[in-house]
Image (cartoon, rainbow, N blue to C red):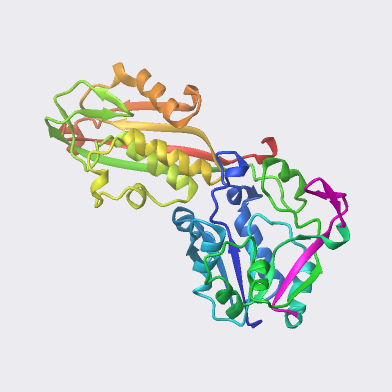
Amino acid sequence: MSDTTLILLGAGSSSRFKTNVKKQWLYSGEIPLWLHVAEHFEKSTDFDDIIIVSTEQEIALMKHFASYTYIEGGESRQASLKNALKHVTSTHVLVSDIARCCIPSEMITHILDAKELGSCIVPTLPVIDTLYMNEKPINREEVKIIQTPQLSVTKLLKKALEVDTLFTDDSSAIASLGEKIYFVEGSVTAHKLTTVDDLHKLPCIQAPSSKTLTGFGIDIHPFEKGKEMFLCGVPIDTDYGFKAHSDGDVAIHALIDALLGAAGMGDIGELYPDTESHYAGADSKELLKDTVRRITSFGYELGNIDLTIIAEAPKLLPYKAEMKTTLASLLGIRKNFVNIKATTAEKLGFVGRKEGVTVHAVANLTYLNWKKL
């Protein structure tokens, strides 16, 4: 073991990226960016532990990809780092940003090899352009561009972050203690992904896979007298609805499960549990919109959906056109990519006895082609 822990920070909102997808969920082939970075570090050297810092929602999905240590981040980079450091017991800690995704292996090696030469080892680049400050030129030979990852003595970094001062990086925090900062050569390849334009400066990232991901969903609800019925987000003219914790839109519930299945994100009960009071009577259309938001933020694009509604009653043919229009709008896809079939149970079972409805749903997703952004 190297007596070094790796911390990868990725709890930010990607606000400067200005797209619906979070940059850590762009795909290189079939691997999201955050995993591409983690696996690259893992191949470069042995670490006591690898800690991924992200949001609660993202961590739930990340756990399906790899068995790292996952820590929920804070409101700032520094707060996220402090959360992670609580779980670090190794002598040294290497901290990097997931957005700096093309770090050469030799750069990582140079940093780790210099661990005894300072309290914080920092990769830098020289400034090649003329610099001005307050309308006066300054000596560019005295200026450095600071990069990550940065290697710190763990106890010193923890101590430096005990104060209320906000530091822009680990070296600034260590320097505030009067400790030695040692500089090593960085790399222009280790460019940080901040805006969409930066995607063209990352040679290690491949185009996303063209694979189609398919999910299947099924839901069943019994009828309940005196409740308004909704199917596919459309009110149905009956004197009964569905018995459910939410509004009981069985078609949307099956569709949400299909979408989550295609994305590998679990099921509707995990995201919107019926044990939580704020989902009581929830509008299923809002749950579907939230599901779409999550899926697109995690790097997927919606393809087509296909629903089969099995119902002896009510009769649904008069509503099918409106159902397609409503779902297409909620999903943000063209209406021709929404297919709805209605059939009966031939008077068999609880559906045949007109006691409830069953819906089967299939949904297809693809990876967002960020090459077109």
Q: Nearer the viewer, residue 48 or 85?
A: 85
Query: Magenta residues?
Result: 118-139
Which image quadrant: the C terminus?
top right
Q: Nearer the viewer, residue 45 or 215?
A: 45
Judged left or right of residue 153, residue 245 is: left
Is residue 147 in the magenta section? no
Residue drawn at (56%, 76%) of the image: 159
Q: Above or below — where is 86 with respect to 125?
A: below
> Where does the image place residue 72, in percent across and percent down from the top left?
47, 61
User: In the rendered image, is residue 211 in sight?
Assistant: no
Residue drawn at (38%, 41%) of the image: 256
Which image quadrant: the N terminus?
bottom right
Q: Above or below — where is 32 with respect to 213?
A: below
Q: Quadrant of residue 91?
A: bottom right
Is residue 132 in the magenta section? yes
Q: Quadrant of residue 347?
A: top left
> Where does the image place residue 90, in percent across and percent down from the top left?
58, 81
Number of marks drawn = 0
> Where does the image place residue 260, in percent across and percent down from the top left?
43, 46
Residue drawn at (69%, 64%) of the image: 40
User: In the rendered image, is residue 196 in sight?
Assistant: yes
Q: Above or below — where is 315 with respect to 214?
A: above
